[in-house]
């Protein structure tokens, strides 16, 4: 039973193959390029094809017929001995469906061949504008510009156009031309641009490549700075100008000592330039300039930075006095120099640099440098120097320190105390005298002039300046038994107001013994 089923299935399978072989077969596609050569084989011939007569049909019509053993040539096509159809200098009109047919005709022995002819891409043109071309062919544009990219080509039957920037596709289309724009161009848009045209039939490609640079000037001016050298009479002048493309040209100029003419010290295509200067080349008030020239800047519009050299000038108190056993702080300020001077404290006639210790404390805060002498003694008395030096010059500020002993301090305290006592006493007497200013007592002896008597004179204030005359009673003489007797007269003075002095003319005079 099983063997019968297997035989039936095998017969059905073979029958299906025979039916398929007798039907219409698929076309075979051959692709050629215009102007090139191509060979179409005669498909389906039996092993003894040389005994047959061959006929080639084009789009259903007879193209050529001949005995297979005799080659045939006609124009740009020919039939070879094996029946193959050969084309030279292929043309677009050769595109068609070809069929190799044996004679007598046997459709089971032949197959259709579709010949497709491709042309291009050809005449590929591209452009990037507006842009400036350098001598090496590279294009450059200024940062922030609006740029157009154009590309076109001829292909048959169809082509694909693509703009690529460094392997990144910027635009693509199937057609004869491709245009696109970039607004506000940035440094990231710099690179190699390629327009590629690809024939969709033959896959043949054509490319156009152009390097595009994006130029831009640094946003800031060049930066000038100084660096200390191994010796105080040397200095390194640096000038940098970063942030632009391409690399700028930096030039360092030094003004002449006799005139304002600038002399070129150094020039280089770089973003950073350095020059070493020594004291013999420089003077106070001299100007040093760094100029940056960029491709996008016209001559005369360079950006620059500059310094005016200044010698140091330390300032402080030249005379300082203190007492023994205290802490003394000396201060020195130097903020005028350029390049900034290095300032130190020195001591003695030999001007030896003071090394910080528990005895000498040095503190630097910006341009101010202080020296604190802890528990000062007589041995610290003398001259100290605030020494400032830069590449232009060296200047010093001598500070003379006087240290007084404890005994000198006691004398000063006693003297101050006595002075204070004298001042207080004088003030007290002045206050007492002022409080008794309305009573004046005169007690002078006039014995030498008029019988040894003493009178008290009285004045009366009055707005009308009236003078009062009257007899003054005289008191009896006083005697203590040891000396001469004196006559004493005492008068009490009353001030009469201007408004009612007429009513008070009869003031009573009182006399006391």
Image (cartoon, rainbow, N blue to C red):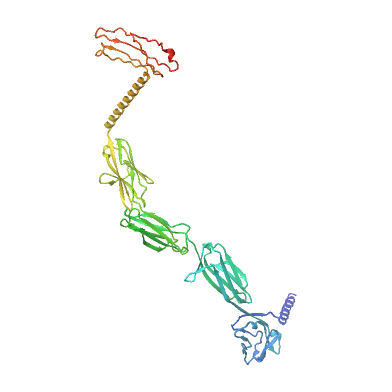
User: Where is residue 267 drawn, in percent x and y?
Assistant: 39, 63
**Front residue (pair 360, 249):** 249
Residue 496, compared with residue 136, is above or below; it is above
Residue 436, compared with residue 76, is above or below; it is above
Taking the image as shown, residue 410 lies to the left or right of residue 335, namely left
The residue depicted at 41 percent of the width and 61 percent of the height is: 250
- Quarter of the figure that contains the C terminus: top left
Residue 277, compared with residue 131, is above or below; it is above
The residue depicted at 39 percent of the width and 18 percent of the height is: 465
Is residue 48 among what the camera can see? no
**Front residue (pair 450, 80):** 450
Residue 331: quadrant of the picture: top left
**Front residue (pair 228, 5):** 228
Taking the image as shown, residue 302 lies to the left or right of residue 317, namely right
User: Where is residue 229 drawn, in percent x and y?
Assistant: 34, 55
Taking the image as shown, residue 494 lies to the left or right of residue 139, namely left
Q: How many marks?
A: 0
- Quarter of the figure that contains the N terminus: bottom right
Residue 417: quadrant of the picture: top left
The residue depicted at 33 percent of the width and 46 percent of the height is: 314
Taking the image as shown, residue 407 lies to the left or right of residue 503, namely left
Residue 210, compared with residue 95, is above or below; it is above
Is residue 173 among what the camera can see? yes
The residue depicted at 30 percent of the width and 57 percent of the height is: 280
User: Where is residue 167 drawn, in percent x and y?
Assistant: 55, 67
User: Where is residue 410 drawn, in percent x and y?
Assistant: 28, 30
Residue 373: quadrant of the picture: top left
């Amino acid at each position: 039973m099983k063997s019968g089923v297997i035989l039936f299935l095998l017969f059905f399978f073979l029958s299906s193959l025979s039916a398929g072989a007798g039907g219409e077969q698929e076309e075979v596609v051959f692709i050629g390029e215009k102007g090139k050569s191509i060979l179409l084989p005669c498909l389906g011939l039996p092993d003894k094809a040389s005994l047959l007569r061959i006929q080639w049909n084009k789009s259903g019509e007879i193209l050529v017929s001949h005995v297979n053993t005799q080659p045939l040539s006609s124009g740009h096509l020919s039939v070879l001995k094996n029946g193959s159809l050969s084309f030279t200098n292929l043309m677009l009109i050769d595109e068609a469906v070809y069929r190799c047919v044996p004679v007598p005709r046997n459709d089971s022995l032949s197959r259709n061949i579709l010949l497709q002819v491709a042309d291009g891409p050809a005449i590929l043109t591209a452009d990037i504008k507006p842009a400036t071309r350098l001598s090496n062919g590279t294009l450059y544009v200024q940062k922030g510009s609006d740029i157009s990219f154009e590309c076109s080509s001829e292909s048959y039957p169809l082509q694909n156009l693509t703009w690529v920037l460094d392997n990144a596709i910027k635009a693509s289309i199937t057609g004869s031309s491709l245009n696109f724009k970039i607004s506000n161009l940035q440094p990231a848009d710099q690179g190699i641009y390629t327009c590629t045209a690809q024939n969709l039939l033959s896959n043949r490609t054509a490319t156009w490549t152009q390097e595009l640079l994006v130029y831009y000037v640094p946003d800031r001016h060049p930066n000038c700075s100084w660096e200390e050298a191994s010796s105080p009479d040397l200095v390194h002048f640096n000038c940098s100008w970063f942030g632009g493309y391409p690399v700028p040209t930096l030039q360092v100029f030094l003004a002449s000592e006799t005139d304002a003419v600038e002399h070129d010290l150094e020039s280089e295509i770089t973003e950073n330039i350095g020059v070493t200067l020594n004291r013999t080349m420089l003077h106070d008030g001299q100007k040093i300039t760094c100029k940056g020239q960029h491709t996008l800047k016209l001559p005369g519009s360079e950006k620059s930075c500059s310094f005016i050299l200044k010698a140091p000038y330390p300032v402080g108190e030249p005379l300082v006095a203190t007492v023994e056993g205290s802490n003394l702080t000396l201060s020195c300020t130097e903020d005028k120099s350029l390049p900034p001077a290095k300032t130190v404290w020195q001591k003695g006639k030999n001007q030896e640099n003071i090394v910080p210790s528990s005895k000498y404390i040095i503190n630097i805060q910006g341009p101010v440098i202080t020296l604190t002498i802890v528990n000062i003694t007589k041995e610290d008395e003398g001259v100290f120097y605030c020494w400032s030096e830069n590449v232009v010059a060296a200047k010093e500020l001598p500070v003379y320190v006087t240290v007084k002993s404890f005994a000198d301090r006691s004398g000063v305290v006693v003297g101050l105390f006595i002075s204070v006592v004298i001042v207080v006493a004088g003030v007290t007497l002045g206050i007492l005298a002022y409080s008794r200013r309305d009573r004046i007592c005169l007690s002078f002896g006039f014995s030498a002039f008029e019988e040894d008597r003493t009178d008290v004179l009285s004045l009366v204030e009055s707005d009308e300046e009236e003078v009062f005359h009257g007899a003054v009673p005289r008191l009896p003489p006083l005697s203590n038994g040891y000396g001469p007797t004196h006559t004493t007269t005492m008068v009490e003075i009353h001030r009469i107001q201007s408004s009612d002095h007429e009513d008070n003319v009869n003031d009573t005079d009182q006399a006391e013994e």
